Image (tube, rainbow, N blue to C red):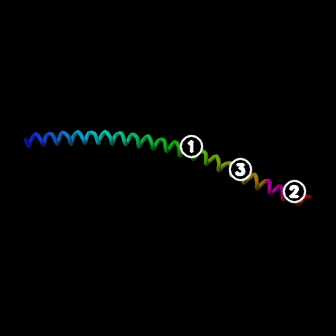
Amino acid sequence: MELFDSTARIAVLENQLNNIGSELKDFRQDSKEQHKDMMRKIDDIDGRLTAIEKWRWMIIGGSAVIGFLASHLLKLT
């Protein structure tokens, strides 16, 4: 009777171990998918931010040119 209980316990534990292993595999797959999604979103945000920074510097440069021209035109009149 003791041997049967030990064998049954081992079988139950092996089954639980297999279940945990499959759940861990699913968790890893989900984690990889989430990581890919996050990296795509980060790349998208980075692209948008780069475009905004380019526009900002273009506006600053244009403002500087307009300010320079305005100051020199005011001196001429």
Q: Amino acid at mark 3?
A: Met
Q: Is residue 11 left or right of residue 41?
A: left
Q: Earlier in the sequence, mark 2 or mark 1?
A: 1
Q: Main secondary structure of the magenta part?
A: helix
Is residue 37 within the magenta segment?
Answer: no
Q: Position of residue 45 (x, y in %)?
A: 57, 46
Whole-angstrom CA distance, mark 3 to mark 1, is 21 Å
Numbered disc in front, either 2 or 1:
1
- Magenta span: 66-70
Residue 73 is labelled as 2
Name the residue type under label 2: Leu
- Quarter of the image with the C terminus is bottom right
Quarter where residue 48 is shown = top right
Name the N-terminal-most of marks 3 and 1: 1
Residues packed near mark 1 inside 10 Å, few (<14), some (14 to 19) or many (20 plus): few
Which residue, given by chain and number where applicable, does mark 1 sit on? 44
Neighbours of disc 2 within 10 Å: few (<14), some (14-19), many (20+) = few
Please tell me whether mark 3 sits on a helix, a strand or a loop. helix
The residues tagged by marks 3 and 2 sit, at their Cα atoms, a distance apart of 22 Å
Q: Which mark is residue 58?
A: 3
Quarter of the N terminus within the rendering: top left
Q: Who is closer to the viewer here, 2 or 46?
A: 2
Q: Quadrant of residue 24?
A: top left
Residue at position x 66%, y 49% in the image: 54
Q: Under tag 1, what secondary structure? A: helix
Q: Nearer the viewer, mark 3 or mark 1?
A: 1
At 65% from the left and 50% from the top, the residue drawn is 53
Do tag 2 and tag 1 residues touch (Cβ < 8 Å)? no
Image position, residue 69 (x, y; %): 83, 55
